[in-house]
Image: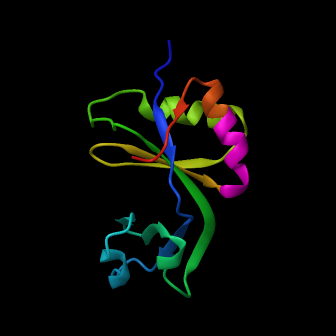
Amino acid sequence: MARTFKLCLLDEKFAISRLPQFVEIPSVLAQGDLCFISRTDEELSVICPEFMAPNNVQQVSGYRCFRIVKGTTPEDTGVIDTLVHPSAQAGISIFTVSTFSTTYIFFLEEDLEKITQAMQQAGHEFVAEE
């Protein structure tokens, strides 16, 4: 039997921004809201609520996010697969970000109803944000 999770839909709308590799991280991102920052040898990527998104950079907005409630651990296996598979079967593009204690699933807001149905059909349950 496939693993299932309790998911909650976060209230915020998110933007994904691409900044130059060595640019300074915008100070607004240290204000305490949910954000993810990754620097590679090619870019600085930022995922944050739309109202905090940097200006004048390559950006895609209009993302929503599910969070696994009660979290996971770095040792857990199959977490991403149980989220990606139903999304792919429904033809929905997603991306995930995992932290030490949970996983976030980002998708375009226009796919909210479709991805919710796909996740429920896969056995995932939706609960209020804790």
Q: Is residue 24 above or below residue 104?
A: below
Q: Is residue 51 magenta?
A: no
Residue 90 in picture, x, y percent from top left: 72, 35
Residue 121: x, y in percent? Answer: 65, 25
Q: Quadrant of residue 69?
A: top left
Report the number of numbered marks.
0
> Image height check: is 92 above or below 83?
below
Q: Residue at left 47%, top 78%? A: 52
Q: Let me know if residue 24 appears in the view.
A: no
* Residue 111: image location, x then y, percent: 71, 49
The residue sitting at the top extreme is 1
Position of 56 compared to 70: left or right?
right
Q: Is residue 114 above or below residue 122?
A: below
**Residue 13, image x, y percentages:** 57, 64
Residue found farthest to the bottom: 56
Q: How is the image coloured?
A: rainbow
Residue range highlighted in magenta: 109-117
Q: Can you say whether 29 is above or below 111 in the image?
A: below
Give left or right: position of 102 versus 67: left
Examine the image and state in which quarter residue 22 appears: bottom left
Q: Main secondary structure of the magenta part?
A: helix
Q: Is residue 112 visible?
A: yes
Q: Is residue 112 magenta?
A: yes
The residue sitting at 52% across, 72% down in the picture is 17
